[in-house]
Amino acid sequence: MNYLKTLNRGRLILKAAEIEECDLDARLLLEYVCKTDRSAVILDPHRELTESEESEYEELLKKRASHIPLQHLTGIQGFMGLDFCVNKDVLIPRQDTESLVEEVMKEMHDGMRILDMCTGSGCILLSLLHYSNDCIGVGADISPAALSVAKKNADRLGIEAEFVESDLFENVDGVFDIIVSNPPYIRTCEIEELMPEVKDHDPFIALNGKEDGVTFYRRIIKDAPDHLVMGGLLAFEIGNDQGKAVSDMMNDAGFTGVCVLKDLCGNDRVVLGRKKIDV
């Protein structure tokens, strides 16, 4: 079967399986199998697939139709213009999180020390280090499997960073100019309501924000001042209904300049503030 017919068949299979982005996913899987790009269907629509390509594509379609995330099938997710390896051990980097990285970048300058709490794939920390000069980065996570993925991404991107297995600050040493975090923030009772790609395939530990969804913010805010320089920045990604709760916590803990910022969709997405400077 040629490229165009194969692509159309893939779209129909994924549409029947109620895959939201069936057209895009069918194309990306075909490009992955055939090692082509998005111009292939225009430039060479009648190219015949090999038997092995057809077989591999059919197998991937079946898996995607069962709601296995596209990124788990290709092993890659783009984030901040970089490609990150992902698997079942880490959250798939999402565009919403780019808002956090972009806001932190506005506050950075060369040579800073950065701690990424709950680092997962390392996408936040490694993006910040990639787009800065001479910064020192530490990524902390309770999951050894997640840290293995983060280290792989650092090696692939040629970025030097330290990764620490730690229950929040338990094994973190030193002080930092910036602490950034995208902690678990989904209320436990809401996880089952998420789309299958998330609830069935993202690691539960990386989703579960406990009963109120803000447990990890509370813990991080309590201990962060011991690991921040005077005037140091604490920045979080939040759920779109958590801006007031998290900003109130930071204000109550004595952080200054606390503000809630929106993502490109107009939803509350980032809360940041600074450790008070004693005078």
Image (tube, rainbow, N blue to C red):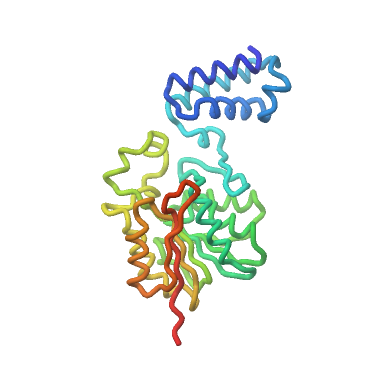
Residue at 31% across / 59% down in the picture?
215
Residue at 50% across / 17% down in the picture?
12
The residue nearer to you, when weighing 103 against 138, is 103
Residue 179 position within the rendered picture, expressed as x and y whole percent measured from the top left: 48, 65
Quarter of the image containing the C terminus?
bottom left
- The image shows a total of numbered marks equal to 0
Residue 18 position within the rendered picture, expressed as x and y whole percent measured from the top left: 42, 24
Q: Residue 137 falls in which quadrant of the image?
A: bottom right
Q: Is residue 98 left or right of residue 1?
A: left
Residue 211 position within the rendered picture, expressed as x and y whole percent measured from the top left: 26, 52
The residue nearer to you, when weighing 109 against 143, is 109
Q: Residue 19 falls in which quadrant of the image?
A: top left
Q: Is residue 94 left or right of residue 206?
A: right
Position above or below: 1 against 62: above
Residue at 51% across / 68% down in the picture?
178
Res 165 seen here: no
The residue nearer to you, when weighing 125 against 203, is 125
Position above or below: 206 against 251: above
Residue most extreme to the bottom? 279
Residue most extreme to the front? 266
Q: Is residue 63 left or right of residue 161?
A: left
Res 229 seen here: yes
Q: Is residue 225 left or right of residue 8?
A: left
Quarter of the image containing the N terminus?
top right
Residue 45 position within the rendered picture, expressed as x and y whole percent measured from the top left: 69, 18
Residue most extreme to the top? 1
Residue at 63% across / 52% down in the picture?
155
